[in-house]
Image (tube, helix red, strand yellow):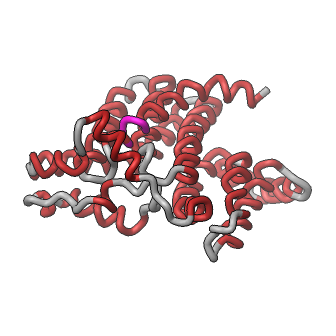
């Protein structure tokens, strides 16, 4: 967390930084300060832990996952600092045509505007938010604290890898480049919920690789290690997240493919890297 706070916060030194950069800089400095235990931080943490030992013990384990909405929310400000609002959708669309021979994120729902299919895939896409926290909570309650820490490390390693792409290679995604799929599927409950949720809180430039798919894939790998009975269901939902992201026009198909590859790669790397950092 400290390494990410320092590396991503450094872009706020660039001239393209937004007007809110002082607040973001303070957040990054405080996060690195507390995580590394710099001068004064260790004593402050000790006093807080003595006052509220149980609450701070839980917070120490969970804070990376709890910070995810804030880290995600600042991404568009960080990539603006680097690129001044430039997006790389044109290049990703070329890759899309090379790999898939077209634009599935634009054409699939238009070719198959089936309300039942749409609702299933949009609901699967929304299950991403459940996948971020429900398996981790299950591991927290049923497994060892080390299992939980490795799981959190696995998820955060996947997110950090994706977030660096979003900062230095921002891509808006098809939701900003193509019209939303219609043909009757817009009447669906989950369709409407997914679109309202993204309109309310999505960061521009956070499309490639898909962190929805990458983080879900990392959760699946972590579940295979710790809660194997739940892993098939989690894997099925992960597949649904990927398909729903493309069918709903939220991600290019190549976003989903790259996100899955990156998420699995980070999840496979995580245990060995965690052991090394423990030493």
Which residue is the extreme one toward the right?
39
Residue sitting nearer the eye, 172 or 72: 172
The quarter of the displayed image where residue 22 is located = bottom right
Q: How many marks?
A: 0
The quarter of the displayed image where residue 192 is located = bottom left
Which residue is the extreme one toward the bottom?
19
Asked if 157 appears above or below 250 in the picture, the reply is above
- The residue shown at (57%, 51%) is 168
Q: Quadrant of the C terminus?
A: top right
- Asked whether 109 falls inside the magenta stretch, the response is no
Q: Which residues are magenta?
A: 255-259
Q: In the image, residue 112 lies at what x, y percent?
A: 9, 46
Residue sitting nearer the eye, 248 or 230: 248
- Asked whether 257 falls inside the magenta stretch, the response is yes
- The residue shown at (30%, 47%) is 245
**Image check: 44 left or right of 165?**
right
- The residue shown at (54%, 44%) is 159
**Image check: 116 left or right of 151?**
left
Q: Main secondary structure of the magenta part?
A: helix
Q: Is residue 50 visible?
A: yes
- The residue shown at (62%, 49%) is 64
Q: Is residue 140 visible?
A: no
**Image check: 47 left or right of 198?**
right
Asked if 165 appears above or below 259 in the picture, the reply is below
Q: In the image, residue 257 lies at what x, y percent?
A: 37, 35
């Amino acid at each position: 967390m400290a390494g990410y706070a320092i590396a991503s916060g450094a872009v706020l030194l660039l001239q393209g930084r937004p007007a809110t950069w002082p607040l973001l800089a303070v957040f990054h400095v405080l996060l690195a300060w507390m995580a590394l235990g710099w001068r004064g931080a260790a004593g402050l943490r000790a006093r807080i832990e003595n006052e509220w030992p149980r609450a701070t013990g839980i917070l120490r384990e969970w804070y990376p996952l709890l910070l995810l909405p804030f880290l995600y929310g600042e991404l568009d400000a960080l990539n603006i600092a680097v690129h001044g609002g430039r997006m790389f959708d044109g290049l990703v669309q070329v890759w899309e045509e090379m790999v898939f021979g077209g634009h599935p994120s634009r054409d699939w729902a238009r070719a198959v505007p089936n309300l039942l299919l749409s609702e299933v895939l949009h609901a699967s896409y929304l299950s991403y938010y459940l996948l971020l926290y429900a398996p981790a909570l299950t591991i927290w309650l049923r497994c060892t604290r080390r299992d939980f820490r490795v799981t959190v490390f696995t998820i955060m390693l996947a997110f950090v890898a994706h977030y660096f792409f979003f900062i230095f290679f921002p891509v808006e995604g098809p939701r900003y480049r193509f019209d939303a799929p219609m043909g009757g599927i817009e009447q669906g409950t989950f369709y409407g919920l997914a679109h309202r949720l993204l309109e309310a809180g999505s960061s521009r430039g956070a499309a490639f690789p898909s962190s929805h798919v990458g983080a879900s894939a990392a959760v699946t790998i972590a579940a295979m290690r710790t809660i194997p009975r739940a892993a098939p269901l989690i894997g099925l939902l992960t597949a649904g997240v990927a398909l729903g992201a493309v069918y709903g026009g939220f991600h290019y198909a190549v976003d989903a493919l790259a996100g899955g590859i990156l998420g699995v790669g980070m999840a496979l790397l995580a245990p060995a890297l965690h052991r090394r950092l423990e030493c």
